[in-house]
Image (cartoon, rainbow, N blue to C red):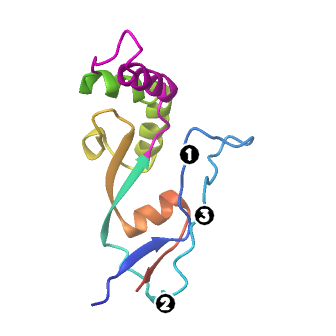
Amino acid sequence: MLHNLWLFSLVVGAFAAPSQHGAYKVKEKVAHPSNWARHSDPPSSHTITLRFGLPQANFDLLVQHLNEISHPDNPRYGEHLTKEEVEALVAPPPESLDAVTKWLGSHGFSVGDISHSAAKDWITVNASVAQAEKMLNTVSVRYY
């Protein structure tokens, strides 16, 4: 059975890494696997889900907490962080969240169109292929 996958020619990564000209830059480019062949261009009206990962704040502090509570010689050994405490530790800086929300707004998304993970470190929107191509300044291709 063949599985179809739509790839954008660019994977847009870090919104927190503006270039010297103020525009955001591509963090990483990903090529399709060498054994895949181009199938077709996807319909521009097809809806896809876009997920944007934001840089997590205080990740080093989370690791420190985890090391402390898991080491038998540490006075905090055996304590636990609540789900809410972990989410607060890894939540992105408010300015990152605001920047991505404003950028999505500039592409026609309202607050109701945007969903967040519990820690707000992932933002999800549904967009048409045409809208995603415009947002990401790229072209999508269907491979199998």
Q: Tell me if 18 is positioned left or right of 62 in this view.
A: right
The structure residue drawn at horizontal position 40% and vertical position 22%, both measured from the top left corner, is 71
Query: What's the mark number on residue 29?
Result: 3
Query: What's the mark number on residue 87?
Result: none
112 up-or-down from 47: above or below? above
Query: What's the mark number on residue 37?
Result: 2
Q: Which of marks 1 and 2 is nearer the N terminus?
A: 1
Q: Nearer the viewer, residue 22 or 31?
A: 31
Identify the secondary structure beneath mark 3: loop
How much space separates mark 2 and mark 3, taking CA atoms? 18 Å
- Image marks 2 and 3: residues in contact by CB distance under 8 Å: no
Quarter in which the C terminus is drawn: bottom left
Range of magenta residues: 53-80
How much space separates mark 1 and mark 2, taking CA atoms? 29 Å
The residue that label 1 is drawn on is 14
Image location of residue 25, percent across then percent down: 64, 50
Judge whether residue 28 is colored magenta. Answer: no
User: How many other residues sit within 10 Å of disc 1, few (<14), some (14-19) or many (≥20)?
Assistant: some
- Mark 3 residue type: Lys
